[in-house]
Image: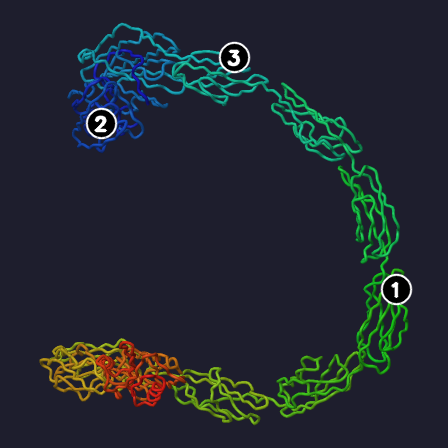
């Protein structure tokens, strides 16, 4: 809330430290807080205060505060924290429960606030000068609850409670500041006073006056109160001044007058100065309101005629509403503000001038749109004459017709029928204050009348007929049409030539309509009969007939033929040779193709047609082909043939069964499954067609059947895995073999003709057998006979030995051995270091007495065998020797068949040692030696245990290993390309790499060709023919050679490049130069070439080979210079 203390001042005397913060202004004393308010002059402030208010409703804290910086707020809360608020920052600082001191400067005319925040609202308490905070030690407050004094109320916004001198007497003298806008009502209210002796003096002074713009006086505002009492008073009084506004009340601040000394009121009475008057001056601003057009305005709630001018209290907010007169409407405000809203509000902080602008409700000129220059009677037209200001319209027509909305701006007009000529459309637009009109002209036409048609009444198809038409209404075009088609030479003229259709015959309707701008007439019609010459003549009747039989034929033809003529290419007779229907009898004994013809005629022409006819005879006796034997229940295919083109077949059997299909010359006959073995059945068939049915053809078939179902027995129904089981059954006389099935899968090879068979099932299996013969296959399988197969028991688990380790110096009587039982086991075998200990036990526990060290395992046993050993448990004895260390082999890797020495360090207290290879003890062992010579046949891991006579053996030592290698595998996939080769080729020889090989040796004709290669490929130039093979090599020897690849030459003639010399190490001449000798030496034993100057020396080592000799001979023939 803005606080301005520059308005009216009234001086009131105050006897003591008036307006000290009090707690009575809140709803609850314990929650009361207040606000200290200070107006500050120029200069710096930094006052040190004493305790503020003593015990503040039991809160129990002191505030040492300084009033100073303008616009700040110093807040004290129960937490002991203080907040300083300014217009642009906020700062918190904390203090103890003692004093908080802060100094800050001030500027002239600013305010500082000490705010104690309340839970519901805050209370403003005014102070002036540093003495506001200086309290004597003998002054203290006695809090009162609000229930004792209903004196301060805060019921409207911006109203602040004012506490004044609780427990301190006062008189109505001092300075009174009116805060807020001037105006409205002024009220001065007194209070009541109670003394410590119980005397209560009540005084109430109410001064009311209307405050309007200008100046006025209020007098008699000083009062005298008399009372008596002691020096310490416990009473309170309140002085309140308010100015009542229209919407809310404005606060009044009461500031004490320090002119009164403290001792002036202790005597008990005091008389104020004479009454004085106070003059109030209220500032005002002028408002002037004008008009443009006709209207008034409601100004601050009062309707005023315009123009109007008046005054309002400064800063008052005034609202105006524009009120247009009849036939006028409000448009906008202009002047001090611009707005198109009828209601506007403004603050009277300066003189204002406004103009309300009103416009006359004028009707604009209507303009008819949507009316064409020419219209047709009966048609509907959309018209519009909308204009501004109009509220109603009136439409009229000089020629009649109808308007669907004659009072609207938009309407539909229907032109009158039966009228032709000029017509005027008029409209008048109006409102209650004005009107305006418009006219528009048009011309009305009518559509043509129904035409009449002239022309002939009959014609032939494709003939041309002339038609003409006439009607009323001045048609501009015509539309000819026909119900039967045809073409019109000029379909849009009143006269046209029509070509009759060739596909229509009968009565046809000719139509024509007349057209102008107003529409199309009803169609005029004329009927004409169209006749066609006979066309599309067809003969209807059978195309297959029987010799000597009569058949009916008829004619279908377009064009309404009036006469017919029948004939036949093969003769015969017609009962009605000139009618549309006739009966034809083929000549007797004729069979084959024939053609019947007919000629159809009328007045427009003639046309003919022919129909091919097949003349047939009845079928001959059928002949049946197919198997002579069949199996009961199994179908066989039979085929019947006959003369005479049979169309239907009828099969039968003397012994039943079924035929499929039943009406075909090829059928499948299925004998009944219950037929006796060897019965003979008679199969018969008849053939028929439209000319008759043949005699019966027959065939005899012997019927057999598959053997019956067997009963299978087993010599045992339970067994161990792969034990022999004998399956047997009783023979069936008609069987030629038997088939055995295991779980539905045939066993191959099977039993053949035998009636028993031995199997070795690995799992539980159900066996069935079916009997078969060569003629009819196999019968049903027997009822399954199942053998349940048992396996060796599972490996025991959870093996434990107790005690472990045990004291070998004072050993226990025995070791207790336990393990988990196995469901299918009938017994268990204990092993110590792989050697059976004791016999088979049936329970899942046993004991060892006396105790022994070693590796304990247990296996389970049943009728099918013994399981693998369990996970081992190493049993140790306390006092037993330590495991040996430094176990090693003389070689890490050896070739198979080589020796290796396994050695270890001696162990103190050990009398012997046990050496193990892959966990198995080696016997004979090392005894007391600390090494052993072995020839391992595979890569092996070794461990060793030390033993004593009394305490057994230690756990195995750390392991060491030897890797045993063999010669490499035989190389595979040897290949030589190209093969065959020509003499200029370079051969590529390759094979699959061997992982264990360190090199490869290539052989040609069983002789090593080169030094050992490190790659699985090589190149040879010049090419060599022969038998190629390769062997892999490592430290353990050479592998078996690969499969041989025969390499052949495709050379007819081998010619080396110019200046090439052939050299053989064993045929060198003695005339070689030093360079040539160096070249040969560099090649060593390899084949190849080297270039020296213009000569190329080709070195070939394999001089003994036949290929080489042939090659050298070729060189001699083809070279000018050769060295033998």
- Residue 1007: name its quadrant: bottom left
Task: Give x and y (percent) for residue 484.
Answer: 80, 53
Please tell me how crowded label 2 is: few (under 14), some (14-19), or many (20+) other residues with Cα within 10 Å: many
Q: The N terminus is located in which quarter?
A: top left
Q: The C terminus is located in which quarter?
A: bottom left
- The answer to the question of whether label 3 and label 2 lie on touching residues, with beta carbons closer than 8 A, is no
> Which tag is nearer the camera, tag 2 or tag 1?
1
> Which tag is nearer the camera, tag 3 or tag 2?
3
Q: Taking 740 as reference, is 471 above or below it? A: above
Residue at 81 percent across and 72 percent down: it is 611
Would you say residue 71 is visible in this rendering?
yes
- Kindly report the distance in space between the C-alpha atoms of the residues bearing marks 2 and 1: 141 Å
Q: Can you name the residue that lies furthest to the top here?
A: 274
- Residue 885: name its quadrant: bottom left
- Tell me the element at label 3: strand
Task: Give x and y (percent) for residue 425.
Answer: 72, 27
Give the mark nearer the N terminus: 1 vs 3: 3
Q: Which mark is residue 56?
A: 2
- Pointer 1 residue: 601
Q: Nearer the viewer, residue 497 or 389?
A: 497
Would you say 987 lies left or right of 232 here? Answer: right
Would you say 221 lies left or right of 426 here? Answer: left
- Tell me the element at label 1: strand
Would you say 1054 lies left or right of 656 here? Answer: left
- Pointer 3 residue: 305
Please tell me how crowded label 3 is: few (under 14), some (14-19), or many (20+) other residues with Cα within 10 Å: some
Q: Nearer the viewer, residue 1123 or 638?
A: 1123
Task: Give x and y (percent) for residue 1041.
Answer: 31, 86
Give the mark nearer the N terminus: 3 vs 2: 2
Q: Nearer the viewer, residue 707 or 1040?
A: 1040
Q: Which mark is residue 720?
A: none
């Amino acid at each position: 809330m803005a606080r301005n203390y520059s308005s009216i001042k009234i001086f009131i005397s105050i006897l003591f430290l008036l307006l000290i913060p009090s707690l009575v202004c809140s709803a609850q004393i314990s929650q009361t807080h207040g606000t200290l308010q200070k107006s500050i002059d120029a200069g710096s402030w930094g006052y040190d205060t004493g305790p503020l208010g003593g015990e503040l409703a039991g809160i129990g804290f002191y505030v040492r505060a300084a009033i100073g910086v303008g616009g700040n707020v110093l807040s004290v809360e129960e937490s002991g924290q203080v907040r300083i608020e300014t217009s642009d920052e906020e700062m918190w600082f904390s203090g103890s429960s003692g004093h908080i001191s802060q100094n800050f400067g001030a500027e002239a005319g600013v305010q500082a606030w000490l705010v104690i925040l309340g839970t519901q609202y805050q209370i403003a308490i005014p102070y002036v000068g540093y003495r506001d905070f200086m309290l004597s030690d003998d002054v203290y407050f006695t809090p009162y609850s609000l229930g004792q004094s209903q004196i301060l109320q805060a019921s409207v916004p911006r109203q602040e409670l004012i506490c004044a001198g609780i427990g301190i007497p006062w008189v109505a003298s001092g300075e009174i500041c009116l805060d807020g806008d001037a105006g409205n009502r002024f009220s001065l209210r007194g209070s009541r006073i109670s003394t410590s002796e119980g005397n209560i003096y009540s005084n109430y002074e109410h001064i009311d006056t209307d405050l309007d713009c200008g100046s006025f006086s209020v007098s008699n505002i000083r009062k005298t109160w008399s009372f008596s009492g002691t020096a310490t008073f416990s009473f309170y009084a309140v002085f309140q001044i308010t100015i009542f506004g229209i919407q809310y009340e404005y606060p009044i601040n009461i500031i004490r007058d320090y002119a009164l000394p403290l001792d002036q009121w202790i005597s008990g009475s005091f008389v104020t100065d004479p009454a004085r008057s106070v003059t109030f001056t209220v500032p005002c601003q002028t408002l002037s309101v004008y008009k443009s057009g006709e209207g008034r305005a409601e100004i601050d709630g009062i309707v005023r005629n315009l123009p109007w001018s008046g005054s309002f209290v400064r800063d008052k907010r005034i609202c105006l509403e524009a009120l247009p007169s009849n036939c006028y409407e409000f448009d906008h405000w202009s002047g001090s503000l611009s707005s198109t809203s009828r209601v506007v509000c403004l603050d009277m902080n300066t003189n204002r001038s406004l103009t309300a602008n009103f416009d006359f409700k004028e009707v604009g000129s209507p303009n008819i749109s949507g009316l064409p220059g020419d219209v047709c009677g009966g048609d509907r037209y959309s018209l519009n004459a909308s204009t501004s200001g109009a509220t109603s319209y009136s439409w009229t027509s000089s020629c009649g017709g109808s308007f669907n909305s004659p009072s609207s701006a938009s309407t539909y007009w229907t032109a009158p029928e039966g009228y032709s000529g000029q017509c005027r459309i008029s409209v008048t637009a109006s409102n209650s204050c004005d009107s305006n009109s418009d006219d528009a002209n048009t011309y009305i036409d009518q559509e043509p009348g129904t035409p009449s048609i002239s022309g002939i009444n009959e014609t032939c198809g494709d003939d041309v007929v002339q038609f003409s038409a006439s009607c009323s209404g001045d048609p501009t075009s015509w539309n000819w049409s026909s119900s039967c088609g045809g073409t019109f030479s000029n379909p849009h003229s009143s006269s046209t030539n029509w070509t009759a259709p060739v596909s229509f015959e009968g009565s046809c309707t000719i139509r024509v309509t007349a057209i102008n701008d107003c529409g199309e007439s009803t169609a005029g019609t004329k009927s004409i009969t169209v006749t066609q010459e006979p066309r599309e003549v067809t003969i209807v009747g059978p195309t297959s007939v029987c010799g000597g039989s009569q058949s009916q034929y008829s004619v279908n033809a377009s064009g309404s033929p009036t006469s017919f003529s029948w004939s036949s290419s093969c003769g015969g007779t017609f009962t009605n040779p000139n009618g549309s229907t006739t009966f034809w009898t083929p000549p007797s004994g004729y069979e084959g193709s024939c053609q019947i013809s007919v000629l159809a005629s009328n007045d427009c022409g003639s046309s003919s047609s022919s129909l091919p006819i097949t003349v047939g005879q009845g079928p001959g006796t059928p002949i049946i082909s197919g198997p002579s034997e069949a199996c009961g229940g199994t179908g066989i295919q039979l085929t019947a043939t006959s003369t005479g083109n049979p169309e239907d077949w009828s099969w039968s059997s003397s012994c039943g069964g079924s035929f499929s299909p039943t009406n075909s010359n090829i059928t499948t006959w299925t004998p009944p499954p219950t037929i006796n073995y060897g019965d003979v059945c008679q199969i018969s068939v008849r053939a028929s067609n439209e000319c008759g049915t043949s005699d019966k053809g027959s065939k005899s078939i012997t019927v057999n059947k598959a053997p019956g179902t067997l009963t299978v027995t087993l010599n045992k129904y339970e067994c161990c895995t792969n034990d022999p089981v004998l399956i047997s059954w009783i023979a069936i006389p008609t069987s030629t073999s038997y088939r055995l099935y295991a779980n539905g899968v045939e066993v191959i090879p099977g039993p053949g003709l035998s009636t028993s068979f031995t199997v070795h099932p690995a799992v539980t299996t159900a066996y069935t057998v079916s009997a078969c013969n060569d003629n009819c296959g196999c019968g049903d399988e027997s009822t399954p006979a199942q053998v349940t197969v048992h396996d060796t028991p599972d490996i025991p688990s959870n093996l434990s030995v107790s005690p472990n380790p045990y004291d070998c110096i004072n050993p226990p009587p025995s070791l207790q051995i336990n393990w988990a039982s196995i469901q299918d086991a009938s017994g268990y075998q204990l092993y110590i270091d792989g050697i059976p200990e004791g016999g088979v036990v049936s329970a899942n526990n046993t004991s060892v007495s006396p105790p022994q060290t070693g590796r304990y395992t247990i296996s389970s046993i049943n009728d099918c065998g013994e399981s693998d050993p369990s996970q081992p448990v190493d049993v140790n004895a306390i006092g037993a020797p330590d495991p040996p260390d430094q176990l090693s082999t003389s070689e890490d890797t050896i070739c198979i068949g080589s020796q290796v020495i396994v050695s270890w360090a001696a162990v103190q207290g050990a009398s012997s040692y046990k050496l193990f290879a892959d966990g198995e003890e080696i016997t004979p062992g090392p005894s007391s030696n600390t090494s052993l010579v072995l020839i391992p046949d595979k890569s092996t891991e070794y461990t060793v245990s030390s033993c004593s006579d009394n305490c057994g053996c230690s756990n195995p030592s750390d392991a060491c290993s030897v890797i045993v290698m063999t010669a490499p595998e035989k190389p595979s996939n040897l290949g030589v390309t190209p093969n065959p080769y020509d003499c200029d080729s370079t051969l590529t020889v390759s094979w699959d790499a061997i992982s264990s090989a360190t090199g490869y040796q290539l052989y040609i004709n069983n002789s090593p060709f080169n030094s050992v290669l490190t790659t699985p490929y090589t190149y040879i130039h010049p090419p060599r023919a022969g038998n190629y093979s390769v062997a892999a090599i490592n430290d353990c020897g050479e592998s078996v050679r690969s499969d041989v690849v025969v390499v052949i030459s495709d050379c007819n003639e081998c010619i080396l490049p110019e200046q090439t010399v052939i050299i053989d190490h064993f045929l060198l001449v003695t005339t070689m130069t030093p360079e040539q000798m160096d070249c040969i030496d560099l090649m060593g034993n390899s084949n190849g070439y080297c270039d020296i100057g213009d000569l190329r020396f080709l070195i070939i080592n394999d001089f003994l080979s036949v290929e080489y000799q042939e090659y050298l001979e070729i060189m001699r023939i083809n070279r000018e210079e050769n060295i033998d």
